[in-house]
Amino acid sequence: MKSGSSNGSYDVAVIGGGPAGTTLATFVQRAGFRCVALEGAGFPRYHIGESLIPHTFGPLERLGLIPKLRGSHFPKKYSVRFVSATGEESTPFYFSETITADRAQTWQVERSEFDQLCLDNARKNGVEVRQPARVEAVRFSAGRAVGVRVRDEMGETYDLDARVTVDASGRVGMIGSQLGLRVPVNGLDKASIWSYYRGGKRLEGIDAGETTVFMIPRRGWFWYIPLPDDVVSVGIVADPDYLFAETPEFEPVFLREVERCAPLAARLSRASRAAPVRGIRRLAYRHKQVAGDGWVMIGDAGAFLDPIYSSGLFLALASAELAAACVTEALRAGDCSAPRLGAFAEPLMRGVEVVRRLIHAFYDERFSFRQFVERYPEQKPALIDCLVGDVVGKDMGPFLRALETMTPPPPLM
Ligand SMILES: Cc1cc2nc3c(=O)[nH]c(=O)nc-3n(C[C@H](O)[C@H](O)[C@H](O)COP(=O)(O)OP(=O)(O)OC[C@H]3O[C@@H](n4cnc5c(N)ncnc54)[C@H](O)[C@@H]3O)c2cc1C
């Protein structure tokens, strides 16, 4: 095809075939609208972000993916545990304490496989998937998004027209960078470095799939996430000034920190490294707006705060499902203006704000979850709601007011 020529007209063009993009495309296609998902990478492809939280169950069930997950080899996750620098272990926090039946268990997923499941499911639901198809730019006319310019695997470019363009390009943030909308998140400035080991120590029984968080006082924390085939994902999150004070290189910093964290090093004493060391120097960002005339942003393309509560995939799926409802209504009404398309943002952002406050609390040395629960026992269920992801569309006002008495509200986003 000739470069720059038109190659189709759709109701919705989705940039990115990750979990957010495929979720939105599946729901909107099911509602009877023509969706195309444009994925720049060939799948299966590597991605960080392996630990699900229980509240992903709802969107995954509505997508029809729960039977696939049940039949998968992904480790089952029932709990989270914290380990202090001296090796003192908290009692595991089992999700079954507040959630009943099979929703109290979730999974640790290998993203290459999980994302493939999501993409295949979108295809099965009628979404047209083009891959590898890299979106080079969102096309605008009179301030309204009208489609995308795509580069195919042969290096040819072509245009697609769409009534709605959805940015689900993850941290790339296609529309955010094109329109200069990306801003930092006040007070949240962390970096992350991670790798994978084979043969790390596994716990017994239902604890075998738990996420273990190793605390590094005044510095940050490590995740320890068991994956299939005896592999464990290990990563640190800490202040960049601390991490990179001696060298900007990821690998020596990561190995130094693993060695310094004695309880973690003990778990890895018989393990061997199974992958390169990767990292991200600045984790958090957000955008000044998440919808405009003819476009919306979902998942990481909209914002990313911090991985401490493993809320990334949940927020990707939740934002996609909420936005799918707005996109569907807008298409039905023939009005794809910013207020209609962006109506999902307000309830979503109220939930995100609760998570943001709890992230700040986690990094505030004056705050302790144990003391919070002792002082406000009636807020324990709300705290647990936050930790499992049950924060969207709920009144968390009393919880936030209690939190504020122990850790000041962080600067506005
Ligand atoms: C260090 C770290 C640890 C994390 N740990 C967890 C965790 O334990 N649990 C959890 O739930 N979350 C975690 N996350 C977050 C999680 O990885 C993300 O929230 C999640 O992947 C977001 O999904 P998404 O679909 O929005 O974006 P992505 O999964 O990034 O998908 C975006 C897709 O868009 C494609 N794309 C990009 N640009 C283009 C383009 N121009 N054209 C076409 N396609 C394009 C990409 O190839 C990609 O496939 C972590 C994140 C980090 C950084």
Image: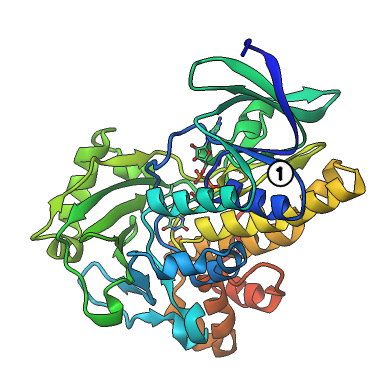
How far across and down, in percent of the image, does residue 367 sit? 46, 71
List x then y, in percent, for residue 411: 62, 53
| Residue drawn at the location 46% of the way across and 87% of the way down | 97
What is the quadrant of the N terminus in the image? top right
Identify which residue, 240 or 141, lies in the foreground: 141
Left or right for 240, reference 266: right
Residue assigned mark 1: 290
Q: Quick check: 245 above or below 350?
A: above
Instruction: Choose top left, top right, bottom left or bottom right for residue 158.
Output: top right
Q: Residues within 10 Å of mark 1 (few under 14, many from 20)?
A: many
The secondary element bearing badge 1 is classed as loop
Q: Image height check: is 247 above or below 255?
A: above
Residue 139 locus on image (x, y percent): 73, 24
Q: Residue at x 44, y 74 (%)?
A: 368
* Quarter where residue 297 is shown: top right
**Residue 382 spot, x, y in % from top left:** 59, 79
